[in-house]
Image (tube, rainbow, N blue to C red):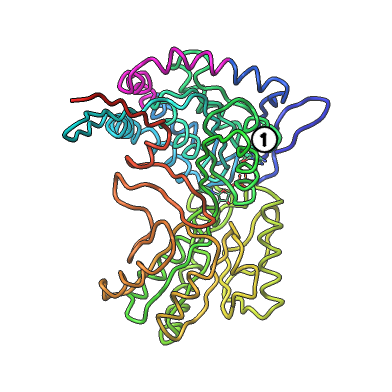
Amino acid sequence: MSASASHPQLVSIDPATGEAIGSVPVTAIESIPRLVFQAREAQRGWGALTHAQRAEVLRPAAARLKAEARRLGELASREMGKPLPEAIGEANYCADGLAGELDEIVAALADVVREDARVASTLRHAPLGVCAAITPWNFPLLMPHQSVIPALVAGNTVLLKPSEETTLVACEYAKILNEFLPPSVLTPVFGDGAQGRALVLADVNLIVFTGSRETGKRILADAGPGLKRVILELGGKDPLVVLDDADLDAAAAFAVRNSFRNAGQVCVSTERIYVDARVREPFLRRMVERTSALKQGNPRESGVTVGPMVSARQKAKVVAQIDAAIAAGATVLAGGESREGNFVAPTILADVDHSMEVMREETFGPVACVQAFATVDEAIRLANDTPFGLGAAVFGADVARAGEVAARIHAGMVGINQGCGGADGCPWVGAKDSGYGFHSGPEGHRQFAQVRVLSRPK
Ligand code: NAD
């Protein structure tokens, strides 16, 4: 993505080919306070509807998203390099899940009655006002969707500032919702961190941010003086612990899938793997075998499962971490080299330790790092030796023992013999530097609303 000074356009570049594929006009910073004012005016009417009425306004968008899923998926794949079936899958996921999500939000925001001998109280979930939703590029449809839908049903109006890397697909997404919404209820804002910051500093009441820890800290600092409500969903450095009794085929299959999916550009990618020293060799052999079967290339080519990095900048960051680890003694078991264009080969590094940046900082690339442990206590200490706490996974045949290990890992979501995603109705939640505030499930939806308690004597 690049912006030219003479023509303030954000140009989208296909990271697989370097081709320009389209552009959107940059939103002038000076216009942001006016857009926020218009959103505030629109909020009066939108906020006066009931939760159920707002959900009904949005419900027909499901069919439109479904009808456009292929086009949206193709655009997302071209704009950020995700394999085409996964990009179409992301669009379908948003479309297919919308009706259920609307119902879940309405139920979560229903009045709650609390009574004692003296007082009868009703808890209402009222709108907060105007919401700034600021999103990353790695799930260019799902991230805006998960921020915008609960905010709207709660009665807020929303200004959506998508990543500068994926404006085209976000623009199309907003257009579809706007076929159904009144004017200024959902307003896209296009630009980079400067537009994002201007939105945070504008007269907004809620900031819903998904992105890196560094940007999250800046947003929190900017939101502080106005005591603005913030929901921060930040980065991760997810561990996988492979116990001595684990099903090694299943553990290796999970490790390869979860380290290299979306070329590792997933907040809950497996970036650190701790394997019991007694099963290190057979586990690594299985990982290497599976990694060699992956096909990397243009994400629209059939059979390709690993695309490029989203940008040259992201590639440079990933390659720098790999090179530094190799220089410090890591052993390369797969990949290790950067390829032409924005591609980084799926890489397995063994003999790593926590002195290396690749084990401490988020990589956000196709790199799986494997360290052996001697005792379960050591595995837990290593897994928790990180400021991040988003997801984690533990593989072990004795599920009770694996569960005890999982419970000692300081992350928001821990999977036992599976990834970290929970059952329907669970929130998507991080701990420690992976942010505070979260979304999904009744607990997540309620964060988009102001609780008000109305009480009367009995
Ligand atoms: P980023 O922090 O660089 O940018 C995210 C968004 O913030 C973009 O829209 C950007 O323009 C905007 N922005 C930048 N500076 C800003 C500022 N000062 N004020 C307001 N807005 C600003 O992140 P990214 O590179 O787009 O995305 C990758 C990151 O997102 C990774 O760290 C990843 O782990 C994280 N992520 C987290 C989750 C989660 O659920 N926790 C999900 C997806 C991605």
Q: Is residue 22 magenta?
A: no
Q: Looking at the picture, which amino acid does disc 1 mark? A: Arg
Please name the residue that numbered disc 1 is placed on: 197
Q: Which residues are magenta?
A: 38-63
Question: Residue sitting at 53 percent across and 64 percent down?
Answer: 271
Placement of 255 over or under 175, stated as above or below = below
- Camera-side residue of 308 and 326: 326
x and y percent of residue 425 in the render?
30, 44
- Rendered position, 17 above or below 109: below
The answer to which quarter of the image holds residue 225 is top right
At x 56%, y 57%, the residue is 296
Quadrant housing the N terminus:
top right
Q: In the image shown, does 91 or 398 lie closer to the viewer?
A: 398
- Residue 69, position in %: x, y? 43, 32
Residue drawn at x 25%, y 32% is 112
Please identify the dominant SS of the magenta region: helix
